[in-house]
Amino acid sequence: MKKRAYRRWRYQLKKRYWLKKILMEDSEMKGFWPDRYDYENNKEYRDGVHFRACFWANTATSCSCYACGNPRVHFGEITAQEKRANISYRQQLDEVALGEPRYPGRLL
């Protein structure tokens, strides 16, 4: 089992990754790399960048719309993984009930 220090270390790596990515996106939008002055002395800019980096480090996905989200929540349907599990279960029941070999043509 992973310890708290490992989780904190991974969180710091994620924050560092997103901080760098956000600063690069800001530089593309502004046309220049944000100055050290912008990041260190402009509290609003620094807090906004830090907030976004923390948000993205903690968030698994950016979207939970009907196309990206859980179908159980949006449509009352089962998930794709549950559909596959149900199909597999039914196939196993058919094999047991009908007595067919798992791999036809082979003796296992």
Image (tube, helix red, strand yellow):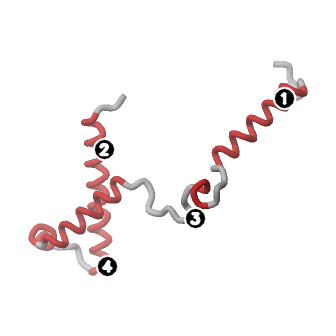
- Quadrant of res 31: bottom left
Residue 35 relative to residue 83: left or right:
left
Gap in angstroms between the C-alphas marked 1 and 3: 36 Å
Instruction: Give the residue drawn at x 36%, y 28%.
Output: 1
Mark 3 and mark 4 lie on one chain; the one further toward the N terminus is 4
Amino acid tagged 3: Tyr
Which mark's residue is nearer the viewer, 4 or 1? 1
Categorize mark 2 by other alpha carbons within 10 Å: few (<14), some (14-19), many (20+): few
Amino acid tagged 2: Arg
| Residue 88 at least partly seen | yes
Q: Residue 108 in the image: state x and y as whole percent.
A: 81, 19
Tag shown at residue 29 = 4
Amino acid tagged 4: Met
Q: Are marks 2 and 1 in contact (CB under 8 Å)?
A: no
Q: Are marks 2 and 4 in contact (CB under 8 Å)?
A: no
| Mark 1 element type | helix
Mark 4 and mark 1 lie on one chain; the one further toward the N terminus is 4
Mark 2 and mark 1 lie on one chain; the one further toward the N terminus is 2
Residue 66 relative to residue 21: left or right:
right
In front: 29, or 83?
83
Instruction: Give the residue drawn at x 57%, y 56%.
Output: 73
> Which residue is disc 1 drawn over?
95
Tag shown at residue 66 = 3
In front: 48, or 14?
48
Mark 3 and mark 2 lie on one chain; the one further toward the N terminus is 2
Residue 37 relative to residue 91: left or right:
left
Instruction: Give the residue drawn at x 26%, y 68%.
Output: 23
Instruction: Give the residue drawn at x 30%, y 40%.
Output: 7
Q: Residue 107 in the image: state x and y as whole percent.
A: 85, 19
Categorize mark 3 by other alpha carbons within 10 Å: few (<14), some (14-19), many (20+): few
Q: Is residue 107 above or below residue 74?
A: above
| Mark 4 element type | helix
